Amino acid sequence: MSLPYAEVIGDPVDHSKSPLIHGFWLEALGLAGRYGRTAVSADDLPAFFAARRRDPDWRGCNVTVPHKERVIARLDRLDPLAARIGAVNTVVREADGALVGHNSDAPGFLRPLAPLLARPHLFRMARVLGTGGAARAIVAALADQGFTLVVAGRDPGKARALLDELAPGEGHHAITLAQFAEPTDFPFDDRAGCLDLVVNATSLGMAGQPPLPFDISHAPPGSLVYDIVYAPLETPLLAAARARGLPVIDGLEMLVGQAAIAFGRFFGQAPPPGGDRALRERLLA
């Protein structure tokens, strides 16, 4: 018996935790379906999508590096958020057969912040470290939530261009990442009523990557520190934040958040509520 299925594609893709996440939810809900992983090179993308268009059981795919921009040429249309960000991490086949590109990174990033964002604040500021694909989704998401943004990258010109494109308006700043590398004794003003975020949107600090050049003294008092890296789960940035008594969000939160949105689009049902702890245990096993 054939089953509806979805998958994650990338090059490489063996490291992806998406099959474990989606498989956990399919099992918990008792849904007939499956989720796999398929290594697809850039040269093979046209043939891959041509074959999947002919497969009536295929519901779509998640897209990981390096294809989040390359897949756009293979799709019939983009949803407005994906078009704005310029990257796709979820492809869904609609009832009419059209392949539609979505970006669930932005709402997935916001998912663990929902309780905080539901509260009023006098001011919201986020320091976003990075200018790559993940940073684009995060900047777009935070701009829509009324944040004043400081984007730091190796190339401040690229950071400025990112802000001008995704967060037009006054008040945002683009700086070099090196500006955060050394300790500071900057006298932060009264942060009462403010929501401050520090977000690592790079792969720096990931196992096998160079360290992130950010000294925790640059985080305002009471900041929430959010690192999208999940290998290791406790990055040096998060360890430094905890040592200062700052609240933190680790990379599994965004990973699960974006997957939850994709799952609903693939299988027509939201993940079961209240299962995040059990899922985290399985991901860390």
Image (cartoon, rainbow, N blue to C red):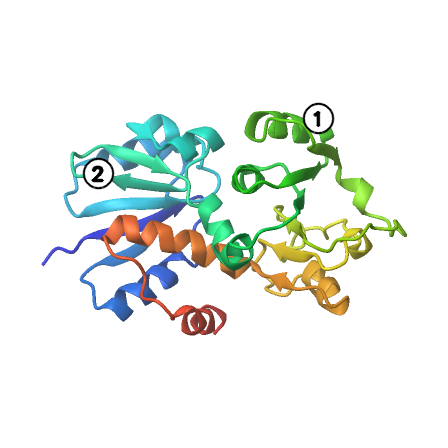
Question: Disc 2 marks which residue?
Answer: 94
**Dot 1, how many residues are within 10 Å of its Cα: few (below 14), some (14-19), or many (20+)?**
some
> Dot 2 lies on which element?
loop
> Dot 1 lies on which element?
helix
Q: Amino acid at mark 1?
A: Gly
State the count of labels: 2
Residue 234 image offset from top left, x and y in percent: 64, 65
Residue 148 image offset from top left, x and y in percent: 66, 39
- In the displayed structure, 162 sits above or below 40; it is above
Relative placement, left or right, of 220 versus 204 is right
Question: Disc 1 marks which residue?
Answer: 157
At a point 28% along the width and 48% down the height, the residue shown is: 265
Q: Quadrant of residue 273?
A: bottom left
The disc placed on residue 168 is none
Relative placement, left or right, of 70 versus 162 is left
Q: Amino acid at mark 2?
A: Glu
User: Is residue 38 something that shows in the picture?
Assistant: no
Of callouts 1 and 2, which one flags the residue occurring earlier in the amino acid sequence?
Answer: 2
Mark 1 and mark 2: span between their CA atoms? 39 Å
- Of residues 155 and 270, the one nearer the viewer is 270
Judged from this view, the residue extending furthest toward the left is 1
Residue 251 image offset from top left, x and y in percent: 55, 58
Residue 15 image offset from top left, x and y in percent: 47, 56
At a point 9% along the width and 59% down the height, the residue shown is: 1
